[in-house]
Amino acid sequence: MELNFAGIKLRNPLVLLSGTAGYGKELEEIIDISRLGALICKTITILPREGNPPPRTAETASGLINSIGLENPGLKTFIKEITPYVKNLPLPVLPSIAGNKKELAHMAKKLEETGLAGLELNLSCPNVSGCEFNPVSPADLYKTIRAVRQSVKMPILAKLPPDLFRIESLVKAAEDAGSNGLTIANTFPALLFDVRKRKPALGGITGGLSGPAILPLSLYLVFKARQVTKLPILGSGGVFDGPSALSMLLAGANAIGLGTVNFYRPDAYQEILLALKKHG
Ligand SMILES: Cc1cc2nc3c(=O)[nH]c(=O)nc-3n(C[C@H](O)[C@H](O)[C@H](O)COP(=O)(O)O)c2cc1C
């Protein structure tokens, strides 16, 4: 099941998605992460962030909404304390970064020096002020990715916002800017209420919807993207079992992201690998 994804060698197409597997440490204690294709780290920013007030997650029918607010230790600590750990994990690891054009180019340069396998650009963090990339215009997306492309040679995956109506133009912009691959897509902007308290369910008020609830939407996005690009696509959104993973491939993805499922069925990869062997 080996594949070359955007210049990164994966032992199989299953990829742990950003923010749902931390830096691998907790998950490594409960599953055999050497059986997965790659790990994308929780997004970091140039300076540390405390994140949003709690509650940060709430469940809905077949899904989860979260507003973590990109809590992270910042670039310096990531390079000093986290990189040595993730470099020893038994699978390729990609840091994920968010910020403005200048910050992204700077962070990318520093991270390239660590020798990690590649880089994911989180270009759609709906929960973070100062990083309101939703909706991002294709022209701005192009400029941002271009700035990173000019600063590094390492493989870049552009993680696109879940823009159902402009996905093709965003894909073309990312490709023209020199992205090696695409992650399609991030969580969908969403809102839930705690009706007993008559208040939003999340401290950050709005959040991002993930989990099986968004599977048909992410399949739609991947399918539309595939019609306009040959770039490798990491399908992200709602995969939780064999049929949902196979659907991602049928829609046109080359690799399959596992996100929310890591919280409630972290061993789902076993069933998915069997399904891929049988039908993939
Ligand atoms: C709790 C939580 C935290 C997340 N944090 C990040 C993040 O830091 N950066 C990012 O690009 N995506 C983040 N995501 C989005 C996931 O990487 C993934 O794109 C999304 O959840 C859709 O996939 P899923 O339905 O399989 O979870 C987060 C998702 C969840 C549920």
Image (cartoon, rainbow, N blue to C red):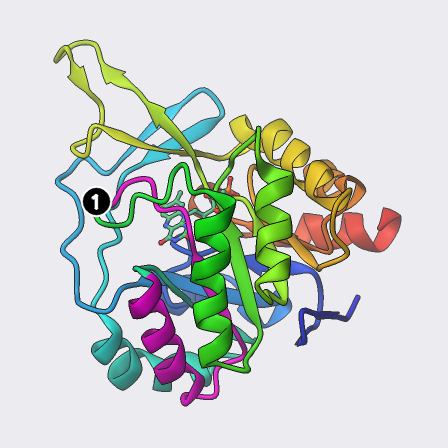
- Please indicate, yes or no, whether residue 213 appears anywhere in the rendered image: yes
Instruction: Looking at the picture, tell me which residue is in the foreground, 147 or 23.
Output: 147
Relative side of 50 to 157, left or right? left
Q: Please report the residue visible at 17 percent of the width from the left and 65 percent of the height from the top.
A: 48
- Up/down of 154 relative to 213, above or below: below
Count of number-bearing discs: 1
Q: Please report the residue visible at 23 percent of the width from the left and 38 percent of the height from the top.
A: 56
Q: Position of residue 36 (x, y in %)?
A: 61, 65
- Up/down of 158 relative to 239, above or below: below
Q: Please report the residue visible at 71 percent of the width from the left and 65 percent of the height from the top.
A: 12
Question: How crowded is the residue under tag 1: few (<14 C-alpha within 10 Å), some, or many (20+)?
Answer: few
Give the residues in magenta.
Answer: 101-129
Q: Is residue 103 magenta?
A: yes
- Up/down of 274 relative to 101, above or below: above
Q: Please report the residue visible at 55 percent of the width from the left and 82 percent of the height from the top.
A: 153
The quadrant of the rendering that contains the N terminus is bottom right
Quadrant position of residue 143: bottom left
Residue type for callout 1: Ser
Q: Position of residue 223 (x, y in %)?
A: 73, 38
Q: Position of residue 132 (x, y in %)?
A: 30, 43
Instruction: Looking at the picture, tell me which residue is in the foreground, 72 or 102.
Output: 102
Q: Is residue 105 magenta?
A: yes
Q: Position of residue 229 (x, y in %)?
A: 74, 52
Judging from the image, what secondary structure is the residue with disc 1 in? loop
Determine which residue is flagged by label 1.
Answer: 129
